[in-house]
Each structure stands twice: as C-alpha cells, then as structure tokens.
Amino acid sequence: MVSVREGAAVEPVGDVVAELGEGPYWVPEDDCLLWVDIPRGELHRTYFPSRETLTVDLGAVSAAFPALGGGILTAGGSRLVLHLPAERGEKWTSRTIGEVPAREGVRFNDAAVDPAGRVWVGSMHIDETDPLGELLRLDPGGELTTVVKGVTISNGISWSPDGGRMYYVDSPTRRVDVFDYDPATGEAFQRRVFCDVSAFPGVPDGLTVDADGYIWVAMHGGSALLRITSDGERDAVLELPVSMPTSCAFGGPGMSDLYVTTASRGLNEAGRAAEPLAGRLLRLHPGPAGLPSTTTYATLPA
Ligand code: BGC
Ligand code: CA
C-alpha cells in the first residue's frame, strides 16, 4: 500500500475559472477529463497532454459520463440526457434517457456510475435547507427508481473495490454513509453511518475510492480533502489552497493524478484575491492510485 503525501504540490490545469466546478470523471480511452460548471450549465472536456479544454453550453448539467456505445450521458435539472458530440461549431444532438417530474426548488446534483455501468443520480434542495431531494437509480427499462428519500443535498456516490459497498453523502448531515451493495442487481440496503466528519470544517461533497479501497472526500468550505480508511477512520488530510473543493477523481497515466474541481461562487473580491485558484481545475500527485472502476462507462437502457 502506498501512503499519502499530505503536502503534495497542487497545480492548476488549464485556464477555466468555474463558478461551481463539479463532477470530475476520467475517460482513459481519450485521455480526457469530463467536468462541469453547474450554474453555467457547461460541460468541460479537458484533454491531455495538451490541457486544452473544450466547453459546451448544455443549459442544465451537474454530472457527465462517457456512455457505452458512444456519446456523453449527463444529469441536469430533472433529466438524464445522452449527448452526441458534433463537429466543432455544430450543435450537439441529444436524447432524454430518464426523467423525473420537475419540481420547483429541486434539481439533480452529483451522479455516478457503478462498477457494472448502472447510473445513479441524486437531487438537492437548491436553497440547501429542506429534505426535498432523493437518490435514484436508472433501471434497465429506463425508469428512475427512488431508493432514498428525505435528502437535502445529495452528493458523493462511489463503490468499494469489490462493489459490495456504496458510499454516500447527504452534505448537511456532515457524514459519509455506507450501504451494502449488490452490483448484480443494483440493490443498496442497510444504510448506516460510515464516518462522521463533523470535526472538520466544511461539509462533505464529492468523493472517490482509490485502488486500496480508501475513500477521498472533498470538504466544501473546509479547504481540504479527507482520506478515510475502509474502516471509516480518518487516514490523511490534504490541505488545499481553495476553500471550496467540490469533488475529486483519479485519472491520467496509471490513474495516479488526482483531479479536484473547485468553486469560486460567493467569493467577494477580497476572497478571490485570497484564493486565486478558486474555480480552477486542480491536479495533485498524492501517491496512491485510483480505482479503475471509477472510470466505468454508463450502460444505457435498451
Ligand atoms: C452542490 C452545491 C452545494 C455543495 C455543497 C454541491 O454538490 O452542487 O450546490 O453548495 O454541493 O453542499
Ligand atoms: Ca457535489
């Protein structure tokens, strides 16, 4: 097992400054990182080694994944949509894959792909105070099945290396929870507290799992990533030069780059001056490698 370099250098990648950068997802076949800016409705594709970012305005987007069979599946608003990229300058074509009734004050937030290719998506109360959100699973017939109700800000979702556990965050609880999980059926059961992170500043947001089964959580408002052991113990704290890291994902050669999305939303002029990297895509080499199943393509209903 590789231990963590808590003081690993933090480097900005590209020059996009997001309002609320979110949802980093590595696409190994394209050496590309997908990520989004939720309030601007933008999908970013940052390519390596050139670090060139292509941006498209999708109107509503909170997460994006490569789809098996081609295209990019996004969550946004109250819909899951498959986008088929067009030549530069041409409009993308799109098709709705799954949808829930639109509700005032509620929108989709983080989404995830399980190790079998199944898509999960959560929703949140936009004002962040009431438990109006849900966690849903996209089933083979195309229906979105509600699995958890009463969520305020549905956030990070990820799976253990053997697929037998699903980690989950509802941010205001200041906990990471865990479910037992059956990747063959997509059943998640026995939700319980995995790790209470309320001793740390900020709230837990996006998360990922590394090849050794450790959980990495972005602490939104806490200027740090936490690394948690599979027993739910704090392992390491990686301080960041931005107050609002939102999510993290491994990628790059050998899955050894850790990409972190960040927010600049709500910072005043002094705040922006104090945090010149707020809103940028950041990269670290903390030591451990990512789990290949965190790059799974989404399988779409027939
Ligand atoms: C949401 C934000 C929220 C943040 C912290 C993000 O996933 O998109 O709206 O402020 O989590 O809870
Ligand atoms: Ca999030």
Image (cartoon, rainbow, N blue to C red):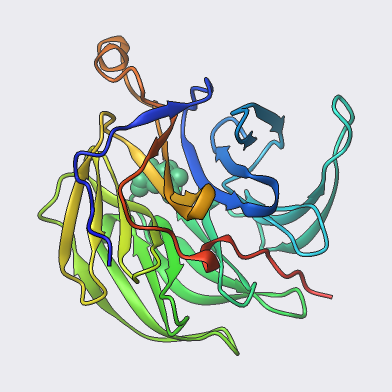
Question: At 60% across and 89% down in the image, what residue appears?
Answer: 185
Task: Choose between 79 and 194: the one closer to the eye.
Answer: 194
User: Residue drawn 49% across and 22% down?
Assistant: 17
Q: Is residue 294 above or below residue 26?
A: below
Task: Using residue 65 as the reference point, say whether residue 2 is left or right of it.
Answer: left
Residue 301: x percent and y percent? 78, 73
Q: Nearer the viewer, residue 91 or 251?
A: 251
Q: In the rendered view of the protein, which quadrant contains the N terminus?
A: bottom left
Say if 21 sits above or below 74 in the image. above
At x 77%, y 80%, the residue is: 141
Residue 298 visible within the image: yes
As rendered, which of 79 and 245 lies closer to the eye?
Answer: 245
Q: Position of residue 53 (x, y in %)?
A: 64, 28
Residue 174 appearing in the image = no
Q: Position of residue 181 (x, y in %)?
A: 46, 85
Quarter of the view holding residue 276: top left
Q: x and y percent of residue 263 in the render?
A: 40, 32
Whether 300 is drawn above or below 272: the answer is below
Q: Quadrant location of the C terminus? A: bottom right
Corner quadrant of residue 198: bottom left
Q: Residue at x 35, y 63 (%)?
A: 169
- Numbered disc total: 0
